[in-house]
Amino acid sequence: MTENKPDEVLKKIDNMSSADYYFDSYSHFGIHEEMLKDEVRTMAYRRAIVNNKNLFKGKVVLDVGCGTGILCMFAAQAGAKMVIGVDNSEMLPMAQKIITANNFDKTITLIKGKMEEVVLPVDKVDIIISEWMGYFMLYEGMLDTVLYARDKYLAPGGVILPDKCSLYITAIEDLDYKEEKINFWNNVYGFDMSCIREVALKEPLVDVVQPNMIVTNDCCILNVDIMTITKDQLKFKSDFKLKALRDDLIHAFVVYFDIEFSKGDKPVYFSTGPKAKYTHWKQSIMYFEDHIKIQQNEIITGTLDCAPFDKNHRDLMIKLSFDFKGQQMSNSAQLEYHMR
Amino acid sequence: MTENKPDEVLKKIDNMSSADYYFDSYSHFGIHEEMLKDEVRTMAYRRAIVNNKNLFKGKVVLDVGCGTGILCMFAAQAGAKMVIGVDNSEMLPMAQKIITANNFDKTITLIKGKMEEVVLPVDKVDIIISEWMGYFMLYEGMLDTVLYARDKYLAPGGVILPDKCSLYITAIEDLDYKEEKINFWNNVYGFDMSCIREVALKEPLVDVVQPNMIVTNDCCILNVDIMTITKDQLKFKSDFKLKALRDDLIHAFVVYFDIEFSKGDKPVYFSTGPKAKYTHWKQSIMYFEDHIKIQQNEIITGTLDCAPFDKNHRDLMIKLSFDFKGQQMSNSAQLEYHMR
């Protein structure tokens, strides 16, 4: 990243237009502002890195998708010998300015390009750090890139941070918001726009779920050891079983994820679930037609099948089927959602 | 719009990915949901159309950028003989389903394509309706398209709704939010990211201004008669003069717009200013370095120059210079903003 002089960086950014941001949303500072201001996220990474100096001291570290370079700087603060940040966004020249402004030039090297294409200054790294998670954890498909980097660059005995992640499903009562977001289309200023309702029903809604809306327990549908999982295993199909905690109606299934940095003396963990503190990932809400009327201790069984959308691997296709036989009603459905 | 059978419409939408939405943001229902739920906007159009049946009865109407088709349906309700809706987004097949579901097929004809390229079933129309306004009124540059339609299709004596719009500037005290949005970059978890601050300062921030933040009067910087203005006049340069209503600091200039439907028996008007009810356009806030310390009745003079960005005509380049000589301080600057 020596080809970009500071003045040229700003000039290039000045010349970008909204069309460029369509292609490269991470080149706009707004998305980085949102991520940095997500303190659950950023402080978890800081604790996992800066508080684990034993792990980082004298090590070579690779940051996959380095954005503003903040994780690189945490790694440098933790005593890494060399930190390499890779990112294909136009934010990278800006990150280089940040690295220089904070006097990390000697430790941190940034490389602009795709992880699959760049040439690193080393053959192997000791630690890979990355904040790769999207909505529904797997949206945007960036974990694939981390696995690529792991297989190509991680030295034997090396470490990935975070190294574990899990996806959970639960079910909620949510009549009011379903009315506002889904049934709204049935009557728009007196007009029937229910064909849009059909489309809206097929897209997970990323929004905040209040804990009091949760009707059942939760069920883990994917448990990933990032050290060993293969790309194919990220296309998964899981059965789930949800048990009602109270008598109530159910209008939607909700998916969220937890993240774990288990290596090092001071493990760090955070959740993006409805009971945990707000994060910019919020939760993914999947509404369905009608509702389930459930009584305490009754059980919904189901299957969730998740794979990248074949026409655009950033997107997710989610198939969810459920079966419920309760005292007051029975209901089953095969649902399909497209996250885009 | 007869080539799209209903099932094919949904199938096509199912097959769209996030990449398609990058190219055509109006093809996603979410943006239409936001606009429809902006009741200030939608109710103003409804009042201006449905309450002015005298204007619409028996007329041929063209809706430029018809979206979900709601304005077309208002026009049909108002008694129009024929309504033509033109839109280039993938929402159009969905709008066609909506028109059919509401039994307006005989009155409303939808055409997918660019206004500049489509062939209308008539040579001239009596009324042009359009909701073309973007942030800062002119962002997205869709008014150009309305003027094109006017020059090509509006019959002599014809009417455009809305027919008048005005852009205003005022100045605000906004230290807290400036700290949060701009000065944030000076110290991000202990790191200096001030190079991003420079970029953030050059972009108008679209957000809600509280009325109590307003320090000066407002000044009209553009007054458009949509019936007569030419495309070239939308590239404008205006002097402004702002007088302080109280002693205070000023951290930003704010721009907003008002819209008027002056034709018909029942004229309709709405404002997107900070003192008016919330709209999804909010206001456009332009911060600058330092601040102005002003005393009641002191005056800031300035010039605002606004033109489409040459590399992408959806974007706006805004040059704002101001000069202030007050009792307690003097300040002047030449600022540049890029809205994208």
Image (cartoon, coloured by chain):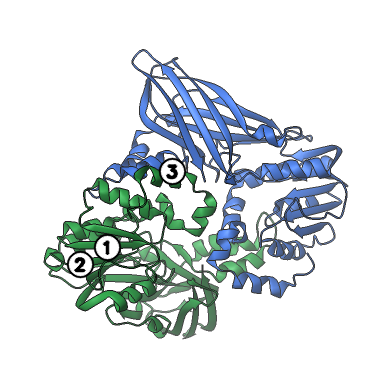
Chain colours: A green, B blue
- Amino acid type shown at disc 2: Val
Q: According to the image, label 2 marks what residue? A: A60
Q: Residue at x 67, y 55 (%)?
A: B67
- Residue B176 is drawn in which quadrant? top left
Q: According to the image, label 1 marks what residue? A: A84
- Amino acid type shown at disc 1: Ile
| Dot label at residue A11 | 3
User: Mark 2 or 1 closer to N-term?
Assistant: 2
Q: Residue A130, percent across and down?
A: 30, 66
C-alpha separation, residue under disc 2 versus residue under disc 3: 33 Å
CB under 8 Å between callouts 2 and 1? yes
**B126 up-or-down from A80: above or below:** above
Q: Is residue B252 left or right of residue A38?
A: right
Q: Residue at x 43, y 70 (%)?
A: A139
Question: Callout 1: helix, strand or loop?
Answer: strand
Question: Callout 3: helix, strand or loop?
Answer: helix
Q: Residue at x 47, y 34 (%)?
A: B336
Answer yes or no: are tags 2 and 3 on the same subunit: yes
Of all chains, the one bearing label 1 is A
Of all chains, the one bearing label 2 is A
Label 2 neighbour load within 10 Å: few <14, some 14-19, many 20+:
many
Q: Residue B285, percent across and down?
A: 46, 36
Q: Residue A4, percent across and down?
A: 37, 50
Q: Is residue A12 left or right of residue B280?
A: left
Label 3 neighbour load within 10 Å: few <14, some 14-19, many 20+:
few
Label 1 neighbour load within 10 Å: few <14, some 14-19, many 20+:
many
Q: Residue B192, percent across and down?
A: 26, 45
- Residue B88 is drawn in which quadrant? bottom right
